[in-house]
Amino acid sequence: MLMYKQKKIPAGRNRLLISITVIGSAGPIRFVVNEEELVAAVMDTALKSYAREGRLPLLGSNINDFVLYCPIAGTEALSPLESIGSFGVRNFMLCKKPQQVEAVGDGKPVTVGITRKNSGSWKSWFNRSLSLKVSSH
């Protein structure tokens, strides 16, 4: 019989099961955190879990490139120095920060974020799958 030691949680510390949806990904990431944990630490854990699971699109691991939102609380990004339990919710959205890149041609700044290569329609999927099966002799 295999015995293991359970971690003891100090009195007064609550743990939360949170769900973080990454824009462009198939589904949310769920994990347990202490309610006193900072938003920055939660973002770091989410990015590491995302990469460990091999999800797409590839995001990177720099938390300074991302913002965490609470869809219920409004459109303001959460401060990385606040505790995750102070919001009273368990569902969050992780989004890549828009980056300013100067265009080569006209010099106007262009905002770049996560984009999809195709429309994702069934027609584009069908055409791609046909092109993979065509063999040339």
Image: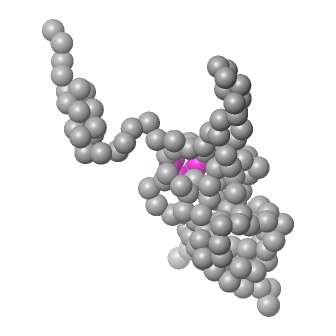
Magenta segment? 51-55
- Magenta span: chief secondary structure: loop
Q: Quadrant of residue 22?
A: bottom right
Res 88 quadrant in image: bottom right
Q: Residue at x 65, y 67 (%)?
A: 75
Tag count in the figure?
A: 0
Q: Quadrant of residue 133?
A: top left
Rendered view: 123 above or below 40: above
Name the side, left or right, on which 54 lies relative to 100: left
Query: What is the quadrant of the C terminus in the image?
Result: top left
52 drawn magenta: yes
Q: Nearer the viewer, residue 104 or 78?
A: 104
- Residue beneath the point at 30% across and 45% down: 121
Give the residue drawn at x 67%, y 46%: 98
Residue 133 appears left or right of 55: left
Q: Foreground residue, 1 or 125?
A: 125
- Above/below status of 4 relative to 96: below
Give yes or no for residue 19 being in the magenta stretch: no
Q: Is residue 98 left or right of residue 124?
A: right
Q: Is residue 54 visible?
A: yes
Q: Residue at x 35, y 44 (%)?
A: 120
Q: Position of residue 20 (x, y in %)?
A: 58, 65
Give the colour scheme shown.
Answer: one colour
